[in-house]
Amino acid sequence: MPAGPKMSVGSDNQQIHVVAGVVRDRHGKILLTRRPQHVHKGGCWEFPGGKVRTGESELEALRRELAEEVGIQVRRTRPLIAIHHTYPDRDIRLAVWHVQDYGGTAVGRENQQWTWSRQEQLRSYHMPEANEAVVNALLLPDFYLVTPEPGDQTGRFVDSIDRCLRNGTRLIQLRAKTVQPSNYRAIARIVIPLCHAYKAQVLLNAPAEWVTELAADGVHLTSRALANTAHRPLPKNRWVAASCHNQKELEQARRIGCDFVVLSPVHETNSHPGSKALGWTRFAQLTGAANMPVYGLGGLGPADLSAAYQNGAQGVAAMRGLWEAAGN
């Protein structure tokens, strides 16, 4: 997992490096444990884990903590997200990992309360503030489809989206810059219920006030709209995402309370031939300090998912790569 941001220089806060694991049972439920009342954030629910000891790697600490705390032997993992959060009395650097395979039976071994939660119920648990972005990462899928322009063939466009949905797409940005606003709204009124029938979510690349009116799931801000937005434009029950290309835009996305972002271009693309590519190294550096889920965009497709994971990404955002993978 890419290194997280540096702790604030000169801070009097205690600085703590913590690891946590997302552990699922055979039904897909996620293991949560409850912090003792006498400790920091006592009574809150969290993902099991603990402090990284001096000389330990994150994975060594994760294996030790999960064995001690919930009695499982971690066999295979992948990075999920890295978070840096400042509380009044301490700075936490939290590295969260998906536990993809483990041995043993999970159970609270330290007399702590524990439970298995369905993923969609995670927001109902009172958790430390640092875990908000972790929950968002768990609720977001691996792929984020950005639609191409619909042109004047709305029926064909909708059929193509249907093929993407049948192919497993569950998060879509409805992007249509070349159509009139009235046509965009008409298309949205067809696409949104279609996506909801597949339990997929739709973000509008359009004014935020249209989201509630059209029963969409959120808004996607362009980098220009992001720069001109002073406050989060939607309540927490709707997604707010943004397009970012550099550290300044990521900081603005964090400032207004975005839930996730798309960072581009990872590679050079035919659609933006003059844009300088970030490359995976710079992408990982920026993502490690983003404090929210980040999709990689730019010359990527389904085959790049593993590389995206290893460089700190939530997953892959794509237009052509996902559109063509569905046979369009």
Image: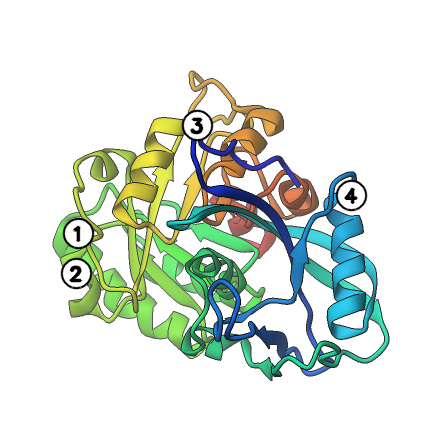
Q: In this picture, is 25 found above or below 50?
A: below
Going from N to C along the chain, the mark reached first, 1 or 3, is 3
Q: Which secondary structure, mark 4?
A: loop
Residue found at x 47% / y 75% = 198
Real-space CA distance between mark 3 and mark 2, rounded to the nearest whole angstrom = 45 Å
Q: CA distance from mark 1 to mark 3?
A: 42 Å
Q: Is residue 212 left or right of residue 277?
A: left
Answer with mark 2 or mark 4, whichever residue precedes in sequence. 4
In 3D space, how far apart are the residues under numbered discs 1 and 2 (Cα atoms)? Answer: 6 Å
Q: Which residue is mark 2?
A: 210
Residues at marks 4 and 1 touching, judged by CB atoms closer than 8 Å: no
Sequence-wise, the earlier of marks 4 and 3 is: 3
How far from the left and from the top, in percent, is residue 83? Answer: 51, 47
Q: What amino acid type is highlighted by mark number 3?
A: Gly
Q: Earlier in the sequence, mark 4 or mark 1?
A: 4
Mark 2 or mark 4: which is in front?
4
Between 269 and 240, which is closer to the camera in this rendering?
240
The residue type indicated by label 4 comes to: Glu
Q: Badge 1, how many Cα within 10 Å: few under 14, some, many 20+?
A: few
Residue 56 - label: 4
SS class of the residue under badge 1?
loop
**Residues under numbered marks 3 and 2 in contact, where contact means CB atoms less than 8 Å apart:** no
Q: Which mark is residue 10?
A: 3
Label 1 sits on residue:
207
Q: Residue at x 40, y 28 (%)?
A: 247
Q: Is residue 21 visible?
A: no
